């Protein structure tokens, strides 16, 4: 049975699944990368995702255009990011705790809105598969990478975009400076708080899309707590990726591929208890982290609220 | 001038003291908007909340039953925070503590009660200690961020429980009946904790938790170990310079934190459920953090804080029942309360700093 | 620090005062010796049922099946005037559920349903304290008679029976002879269903392959969806699965035009073009019988089992998806065989 | 600046201070710590607001609320602690916060070109592509200067710019500064080093306790005059040291190598001996292995080769805690960071090493009666100004925290003492006191390693002086037989011709 795992078809299957599974993680983790690079740890990603997922679903369910739904999800995500900004930047609250508060708020509110505005599990027709012309005709690779819905492509597109914004724009420079040495940035007239607000809002928007990618992309339903803690994994992936877009991509792919692998292991009937198989991605993430930690790249001001002059 | 200063000081004290209350009130006001959205009269709802939590024997005992694991977990969180680490892995530590305690009690059920009971607690405590110690060790030795590893380890613990409850630990009676309910056999009665009020779940674990809260206070502020934990938490560099083995204390803080969470799991199965079942924790690992925070991360503060937070949770559940609002409202409300309380903390800190500067 | 303690104490006191002063306080009677429901036969008072559920009333699976049944019984009996329903949902924490069960009992509900096996212990404890209130729990068979309790109903669903029938349908509809199962955790109701399903497939088409995967969770919608994808890539052309997480998997089936067989609730709405049939838990009969028994003064002792034979399990076809007559005939034969005992649904 | 008033809670930081600066002049601002000079400059740079008074620029009243306002008005500031993001390149640091010629996109190539230009003009010698953390302190300072020049600063505030430089680097800096004044730049030079102030300034303003003591032309002033203005009394600038009979070698390092923070070898085959009753000064530009040397001796950094002996005992493998128990004491360089737990009370900090030892603890329990008694004694003996022993340490002034550390370390009657930058940032009064204490300690037979970037301090206190350069000991010279010039050359890695 084990040899079945190493057939070409299975390997392609694993890659295809992994590429798709990574989508929500990518959006959410890239958004969180912005926030963390500017020095804010936002543990509330899962709550922001749920709000985004619900909003997108609600718009689509009521016959709204799918892109309008995505826009609405971004908008609501941004608002959640703004809320986190008020609490953790302006009020300088402990970031870990405020993140948990934001998570609970998003979890509760999205379920509440679902109950009152929709009331039962329904499905919508979300973004259809969009086989990219030419590219999807490529053998093997075409199927693995270019046979998904448009939000999947968008997620991968966000990787170079994030890297570009962080490394090649004046705003990205401000983000990096604020996250590493807010006093220095402040002394040059860069508003530390404003930068952090903006990154939190960007992070919220991307978390909103991450939610939308589930509710109107991959699953086309909304259910209470449908992310099931996915946002927390996304936060972990930012550490995993050493705060770089490419690293986040690597982490998201690794986690998703191992998840796809364990699904295949089960489907092929390889005799490993299912619970052990399900554990695999989590165990592996810790192991890989243990082996590859590079503390030096952590934004020095991460989790530290900034207050001028002491 | 002096009189003026004294008035100012008193005013400061009152506002400072009232802040957490104001924060909770603020959260409830926002919650009232949600209630109005649902077409529910907020006054009726909140009356049900307060009355449900504290209005009768049932409410009070439920609050205290709920406060027990919150306090135990909260104590663990206090230790971790004082030691400069953040333990988000309470959930996994509770689960494994409960699993381990149950397995021990069932496995050695023929042992005399006076021996079995403390050892069962110890088994749970040790499981939590190990499960908390691992991320501590990973942080101290490998530099793995503990938020990350504990998040992952919660999931792993959950699957370990799934595995054990449908296989090795599955109740033989379930196998015989063919019903496959994922739960362990009942614990021997010798390890059941005494119910303090008949016909309620309120059990003697609450007394243990309060005693331990005092013990943790002594540990942190009256012993050399606690001194070192706090020193490492406040300033690892200075502690290193002073010859304190910092990594060892990082591991210790996490391990002790895990131990309290593990004990909370053991006490839950011994006091409430009397067997290992899924859903025995259901979020104490997170709400314990909130309770500890309410108590300003002080073990003695955690006692009233867990009672208050427990009353909020119980009351909110009762509110859900009596006015039939979706349970998610309660979750949203909980989130709001956390956000308001942490945000209000700014004023407390500003005030204390100002006071310090004035003194100089 | 002491200041804070005093403050906290004051706060507790304030809460207590607020509670005392609160208007319209329900359940004023002391809980410890609350009166049990009396005179249930009085027609002027509505029959009161309370239910405690581990997931949401809208999960399109386990909890919703029971909640919908209660609602339909209520409609049948003439609305809220005749049947009052109170519910606590998302009680995934057992301690909370235990509190809810006890409160409902204390508030004088006639029947308190603990809709989750994990609530069993707590419910037994409460049932001992409230001998005049009826309790029900499931899926289980233990009515507590061994412990001398007479006020407990147990109910279970022979999920393996519908699973078997679904398996027969799946085996016959499958052209690829590969069938995928998306499971939550390998235990309880889900395990029962999957075991029956596998047996049904194997008895019908011994050379067919049933691939089973679990997500280790009841609510991991995204992973369940991806599991469905994997099954499809592994060649499956028919899928089934259980627990609330499958809503994502149904979506995947819909998108790929792969047929789906549902269980617990009717999931047709999620995939009108692909859901072939559902094993629906029809609790209404059970609920009605319990009400009748209680009104007749019999507070417990019965263990209900939803079966195909007693109409508790219904195979509901989706009229929008054409099912060949021979398949339907085979399914009907399986149903008949299960009903008369000529077919065993478990290994 | 006219009549500037700034109040902090309980403190009048600036009391109607007048200050003016002319085009092309170097104006020194002199005063002890807490005299208000930094506060005054932070007001000028928009970091603090002021309650009263006006700021005039070229005769026009201006309002400076934020650093951005200041930068736009052509005011630049070089902070004592460099405001550089060390994970970024020089160019990125310079470009930070400035609009780009390409809108939202960075134009680092253009910025780099301009940096090269400026670097050329003022002979600043900075590589625009270097990552800041790889630069030496002197280079970082030049980056700071470029940052200000790039922003078109006509008025530049330099906050204690020479504190971390070798004498040669100071000379270089002064050359650069003079070139800048010739270009019409105005410079405000904050310092407490009197001879430097006299060397570079045109005029000198002295502040004491927030009050203006006067503005005087530099010419014709002596160090003693300035010191009197600063402190308000005569100050002992040269210290008399009585000869002490030296005993046996108490601290021996033999061929010690160790890795630094960055993972490179930062200590290379260091050998030295310190005898009882001797102070060995270590001179050198910061970052040349002094920190690693101190940490190796303290047991905080593992050696890669060689060994350390204390009192004839090989302690190479001993952890920090064990060494402190056997008569080793350490005054760390970053006292706020490494020396005390700021949130702890004074008495808690006074037992930081000894809390596990009797009489401060019994078993695992702390003995508060003994701790309090001990703390009262130390606070009294070492003249630590604190409201009480339960006061949180962070509310004490820098000098008093340093006294607290000194009290803690010296009370343990150390056989070996490492004092790293013991007087950095403390006022002259505290400095006098700390110097005296170190000399007293020497007389009791303690072997002291004094690490200081202040060459005056090293010269004033040491019996012998070791100069470190790139992790090596260049030379160990007797104090009587050397000069600042010779030491400066050694610090730069050059052996002087004798």
Image (cartoon, coloured by chain):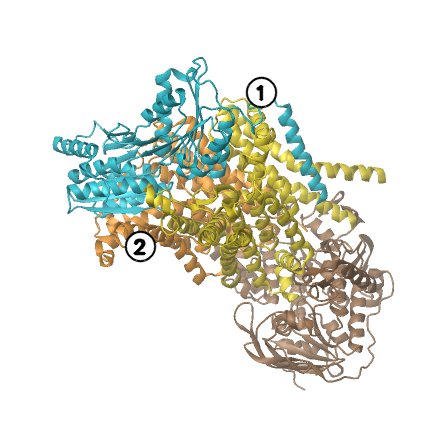
Chain colours: A orange, B yellow, C cyan, D brown
- Vertical placement of residue A96 versus D166, above or below: above
Location of mark 1 (residue):
C24
- Vertical placement of residue B57 versus A11, above or below: above
Q: Quadrant of the C terminus of chain D?
A: bottom right
Residue A65 x %, y %: 34, 31
Chain designation of label 2: A
Residue C43 x %, y %: 43, 13
Report the front residue among C65 and C248.
C65
Task: For label 1, count other residues whose C-alpha is less than 10 Å away and answer few (under 14), some (14-19) or many (20+).
Answer: few
Tell me the number on the disc at residue B14: none
Residue C314 x %, y %: 25, 29
Residue B307: quarter of image = top right
Residue at the spot x=44%, y=14% of the render? C42
Q: For this view, does B202 lie left or right of residue C74? A: right
Q: Secondary structure at mark 1?
A: loop
Tell me the number on the disc at residue A272: 2
Report the front residue among B54 and C40.
C40
Chain designation of label 1: C
Q: For this view, does C225 lie left or right of residue B113? A: left
Q: Secondary structure at mark 2?
A: loop
């Amino acid at each position: 049975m084990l040899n079945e795992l190493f057939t070409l078809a299975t390997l392609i299957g694993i890659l295809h699944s992994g590429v798709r599974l990574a989508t929500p993680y990518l959006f959410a983790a890239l958004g969180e990368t912005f926030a963390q690079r500017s020095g804010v740890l936002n543990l509330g990603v899962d709550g922001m995702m749920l709000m985004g997922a619900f909003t997108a679903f609600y718009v689509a369910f009521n016959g709204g255009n799918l892109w309008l739904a995505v826009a609405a999800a971004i908008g609501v995500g941004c608002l959640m990011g703004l809320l986190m900004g008020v609490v953790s930047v302006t009020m300088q609250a402990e970031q870990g705790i405020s993140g948990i508060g934001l998570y609970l708020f998003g979890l509760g509110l999205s379920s509440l809105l679902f109950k009152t505005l929709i009331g039962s599990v329904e499905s919508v027709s979300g973004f259809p598969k969009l086989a990219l012309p030419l590219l999807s005709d490529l053998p093997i690779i075409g199927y693995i990478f270019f046979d998904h819905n448009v939000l999947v492509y968008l997620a991968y597109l966000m990787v170079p975009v994030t890297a570009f914004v962080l490394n090649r724009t004046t705003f990205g420079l401000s983000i990096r400076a604020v996250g590493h040495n807010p006093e220095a940035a402040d002394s040059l007239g860069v508003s530390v708080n404003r930068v952090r607000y903006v990154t939190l809002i960007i992070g919220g928007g991307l978390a909103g899309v991450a939610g939308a990618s589930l509710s109107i992309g991959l699953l086309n339903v909304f259910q209470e707590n449908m992310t099931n803690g996915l946002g927390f994994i996304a936060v972990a992936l930012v550490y995993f990726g050493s705060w770089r877009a490419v690293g986040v991509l690597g982490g998201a792919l690794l986690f998703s591929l191992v998840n796809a692998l364990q699904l295949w292991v089960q489907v092929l009937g390889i005799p490993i208890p299912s619970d052990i198989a399900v554990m695999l991605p989590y165990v592996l993430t810790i192991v890989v982290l243990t082996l590859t930690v590079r503390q030096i790249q952590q934004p020095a001001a991460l989790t530290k609220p900034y207050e001028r002059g002491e | 001038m002096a009189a003026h200063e004294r008035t100012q000081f008193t005013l400061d004290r009152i506002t400072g003291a009232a802040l957490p209350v104001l924060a909770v009130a603020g959260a409830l006001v926002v919650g009232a908007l949600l209630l109005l959205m649902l077409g529910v009269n907020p006054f009726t709802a909140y009356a049900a909340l307060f009355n449900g939590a504290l209005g009768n024997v049932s409410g009070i005992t439920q609050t205290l039953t709920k406060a027990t694991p919150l306090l135990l977990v909260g104590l663990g969180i206090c230790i971790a925070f004082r030691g400069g680490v953040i333990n988000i892995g309470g959930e996994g530590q509770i689960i494994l503590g409960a699993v381990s305690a149950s397995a021990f009690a069932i496995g050695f059920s023929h042992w005399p009660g006076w021996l079995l009971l403390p050892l069962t607690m110890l088994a749970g405590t040790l499981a939590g200690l190990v499960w908390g110690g691992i991320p501590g060790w990973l942080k101290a030795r490998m530099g793995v961020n503990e938020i990350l590893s504990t998040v992952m380890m919660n999931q792993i613990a959950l699957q370990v429980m799934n595995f054990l409850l449908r296989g090795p630990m599955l109740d033989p009676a379930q196998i015989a009946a063919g019903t496959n309910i994922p739960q362990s056999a009942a614990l021997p009665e010798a390890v059941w904790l005494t119910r303090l009020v008949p016909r309620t779940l309120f059990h003697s674990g609450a007394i243990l938790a309060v005693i331990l809260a005092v013990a943790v206070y002594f540990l942190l502020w009256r012993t050399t170990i606690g001194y070192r934990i706090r020193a490492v938490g406040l300033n690892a560099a200075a502690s290193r310079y002073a010859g304190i083995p910092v990594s060892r204390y990082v591991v210790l803080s996490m391990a002790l934190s895990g131990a309290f969470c593990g004990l909370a799991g053991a006490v839950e199965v011994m006091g409430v459920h009397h067997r290992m079942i899924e859903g025995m924790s259901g979020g104490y690992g997170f709400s314990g953090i909130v309770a500890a925070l309410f108590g300003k991360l002080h073990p003695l503060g955690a006692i009233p804080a867990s009672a208050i937070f427990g009353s909020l949770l119980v009351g909110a559940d009762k509110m859900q029942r009596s006015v039939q609002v979706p349970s998610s409202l309660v979750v949203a409300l909980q989130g709001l309360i956390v956000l308001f309380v942490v945000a209000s903390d700014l004023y407390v800190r500003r005030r204390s700093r100002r006071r310090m500067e004035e003194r100089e | 620090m002491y200041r804070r303690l005093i403050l906290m104490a004051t706060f507790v006191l304030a809460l207590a005062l607020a509670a005392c002063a609160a208007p319209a306080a329900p359940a004023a009677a002391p809980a410890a010796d609350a009166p049990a429901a009396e005179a249930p036969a009085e027609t002027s008072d509505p029959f009161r049922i309370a239910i405690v559920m581990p997931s949401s009333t809208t999960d399109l699976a386990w909890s919703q099946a029971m909640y919908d049944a209660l609602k339909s019984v209520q409609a049948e009996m003439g609305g809220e005037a005749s049947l009052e329903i109170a519910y606590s949902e998302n009680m995934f924490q057992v301690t909370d559920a235990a509190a809810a069960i006890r409160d409902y009992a204390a508030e004088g509900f006639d029947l308190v349903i603990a809709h989750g096996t994990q609530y069993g212990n707590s419910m037994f404890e409460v049932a001992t304290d409230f001998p005049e209130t009826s309790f029900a729990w499931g899926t289980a068979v233990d009515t507590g008679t061994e412990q001398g309790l007479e006020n407990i109903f147990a109910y279970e669903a022979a999920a393996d029976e519908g699973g078997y029938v679904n398996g027969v349908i799946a085996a016959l509809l499958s052209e690829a002879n590969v069938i995928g199962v998306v499971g939550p955790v390998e235990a309880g109701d889900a395990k029962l269903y999957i075991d029956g399903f596998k047996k049904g497939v194997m008895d019908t088409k011994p050379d067919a392959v049933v691939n089973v995967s679990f997500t280790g969770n009841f609510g991991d919608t995204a992973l369940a969806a991806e599991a469905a994808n994997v099954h499809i890539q592994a060649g499956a052309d028919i899928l089934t699965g259980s627990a609330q997480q499958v809503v994502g998997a149904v979506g995947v089936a819909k998108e790929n035009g792969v047929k789906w067989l549902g269980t617990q609730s009717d999931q047709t709405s999620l995939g009108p073009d692909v859901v072939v049939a559902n094993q629906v838990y029809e609790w209404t009969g059970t609920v009605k019988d319990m009400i009748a028994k209680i009104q007749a003064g019999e507070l417990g002792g019965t263990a209900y089992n939803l079966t195909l034979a007693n109409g508790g399990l219904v195979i509901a076809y989706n009229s929008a998806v054409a099912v060949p007559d021979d398949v339907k005939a085979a399914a009907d034969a399986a149903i008949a065989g299960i009903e008369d005992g000529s077919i065993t649904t478990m290994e | 600046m006219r009549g500037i008033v700034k109040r902090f809670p309980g403190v009048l930081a600036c009391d109607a201070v007048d200050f003016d600066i002319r085009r092309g002049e170097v104006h020194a601002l002199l005063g002890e710590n807490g005299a208000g000079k930094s506060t005054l400059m932070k007001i000028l740079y928009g970091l603090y607001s002021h309650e009263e008074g006006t700021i005039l620029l070229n005769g026009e009243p201006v309002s400076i609320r934020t650093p951005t306002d200041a930068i736009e008005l052509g005011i630049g500031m070089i902070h004592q602690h460099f405001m550089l993001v060390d994970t970024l390149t020089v160019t990125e640091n310079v470009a930070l916060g400035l609009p780009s010629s390409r809108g939202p996109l960075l134009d680092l190539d253009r910025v780099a070109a301009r940096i090269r230009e400026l670097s050329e003009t003022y002979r600043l010698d900075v590589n625009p592509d270097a990552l800041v953390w790889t630069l030496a302190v002197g280079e970082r300072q030049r980056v700071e200067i470029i940052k200000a020049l790039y922003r078109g600063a006509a008025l530049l505030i330099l906050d204690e710019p020479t504190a971390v430089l070798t004498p040669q680097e100071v000379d270089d800096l002064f050359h650069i500064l003079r070139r800048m004044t010739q270009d019409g730049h105005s410079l405000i030079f904050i310092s407490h080093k009197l001879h430097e102030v006299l060397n570079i300034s045109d005029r000198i303003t002295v502040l004491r306790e927030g009050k203006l003591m006067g503005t005087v032309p530099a010419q014709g002033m002596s160090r003693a005059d300035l010191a009197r203005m600063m402190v308000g009394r005569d100050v002992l600038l040269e210290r008399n040291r009585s000869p002490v009979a030296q005993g046996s070698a108490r601290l021996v390092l033999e061929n010690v190598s160790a890795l630094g923070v960055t993972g490179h070898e930062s200590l290379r085959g260091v050998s030295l001996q310190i005898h009882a009753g001797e102070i060995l000064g270590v001179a050198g530009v910061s970052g040349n292995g002094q920190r690693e040397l101190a940490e190796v001796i303290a047991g905080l950094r593992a050696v890669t080769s060689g060994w350390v002996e204390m009192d004839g005992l090989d302690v190479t493998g001993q952890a920090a805690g064990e060494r402190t128990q056997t008569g080793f004491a350490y005054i760390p360089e970053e006292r706020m960071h490494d020396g005390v737990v700021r949130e702890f009370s004074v008495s808690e900090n006074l037992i930081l090493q000894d809390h596990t030892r009797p009489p401060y603890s019994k078993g695992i329990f702390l003995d508060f009666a003994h701790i309090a008694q001990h703390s009262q004694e130390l606070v009294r003996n070492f003249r630590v100004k604190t409201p009480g022993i339960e006061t949180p340490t962070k509310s004490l002034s820098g000098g008093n925290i340093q006294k607290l550390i000194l009290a803690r370390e010296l009370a343990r009657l150390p056989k070996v003492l490492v004092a790293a930058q013991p007087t950095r940032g403390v006022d002259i009064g505290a400095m006098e006191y700390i110097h005296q204490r170190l000399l007293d300690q020497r007389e009791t037979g303690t072997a002291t390693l004094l690490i200081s970037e202040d060459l005056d301090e090293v010269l004033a206190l040491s019996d012998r002086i070791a100069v470190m350069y790139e992790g090596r000991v260049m030379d160990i010279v007797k104090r009587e037989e050397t000069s600042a010039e010779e030491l400066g050359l050694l610090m730069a890695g050059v052996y002087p011709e004798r």
